[in-house]
Image (cartoon, rainbow, N blue to C red):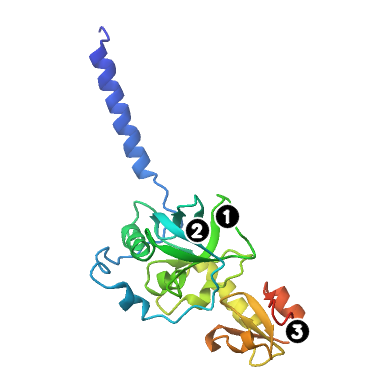
Amino acid sequence: MTITKKHILALLIILTIGMGVISVASAYTGTGFTHDIPFSKYRDVSNSKILNKYSDTDCHVEKTGICEQVVDGDTIYLKSGEKVRFVGVNTPERGVEGYIASKNFVQKFCLNKKIGLDVDDAKHTDRYGRTLAVVIVDGKNLNEMLLKEGLAEVMYMPPSEFYPYNWANSSTHIPDSYHSYANTQKDTSSSDSGSYIGNSNSGKFHESTCKWGQKTAEHNRVYFKSRNAAISQGYQPCKVCNP
């Protein structure tokens, strides 16, 4: 049989389709986290109504920027060119159930808007060069909101200034591999009293008499009996009281 241009073209088309099928079948799914929240859930809900459900964050805005692109529910790009990865959380990957809902939620609060960042002091960037940070919108912790809305799962990867288990609620998905670590941290880092007050949200610790330590919300407080105990848990000393 004589091979003509038509035969070659047909073969190329078949190969292209085949590669496409293989690509879809082996699409990257990350941790496999999914959720069934419909992408239209928040469409007709005002931003203020959602924000009013949450307390102001103890995190501090260290830098600001305009969000130019929302890649997915845990990654955004700023106009400055900086790429930001929401620290402590993980949302569904592209092509996975829940991807659109999580992405739309972040777009609602970030896209073309000025947002604040509290950069992870323990680890500034991930292996892809993205800035690891808590994203702050109107004084609220957007990372925490994603977890409590069920749009993200906990993804704690020490060293980190932040402890995302404290942002979770009873319905937040926590991967099995993280459960034992969370319980261990709870047993070893918490106490009813101590000489130092740690803020699990900011990752800082203070003298018990420090005004910033005393302003720490009760649910974010971690007590330490010694300075070394706080430092060994990854907490950073307050720059005001210098414990």
Residue placed under numbered mark 2 in the picture: 85
Using residue 66 as the reference point, say whether residue 59 is left or right of it. Answer: right
12 shown above or below 89: above
Residue at 32% from the left image edge and 38% from the top image edge: 21
The secondary structure type at the circle numbered 1 is loop
**Cα–Cα span, label 1 and label 3:** 31 Å
The residue carrying pointer 3 sits among few (fewer than 14), some (14 to 19) or many (20 or more) residues within 10 Å by Cα, namely few
* Residue under pointer 1: 126
Number of numbered discs visible in the structure rendering: 3
Q: Position of residue 197 (x, y in %)?
A: 65, 85
Q: In the rendered view, does 39 fall on the left or right side of 74?
A: left
Type of the residue with mark 1: Asp
Determine the image quadrant of residue 229.
bottom right
Q: In this rendering, which labeled residue sits more in front, label 3 or label 2? A: 2
- Tell me, yes or no, whether the two marked residues, 2 and 1, touch with CB atoms within 8 Å: yes
What type is the residue that disc 3 sits on? Answer: Ser
Q: What residue is disc 3 on?
A: 226
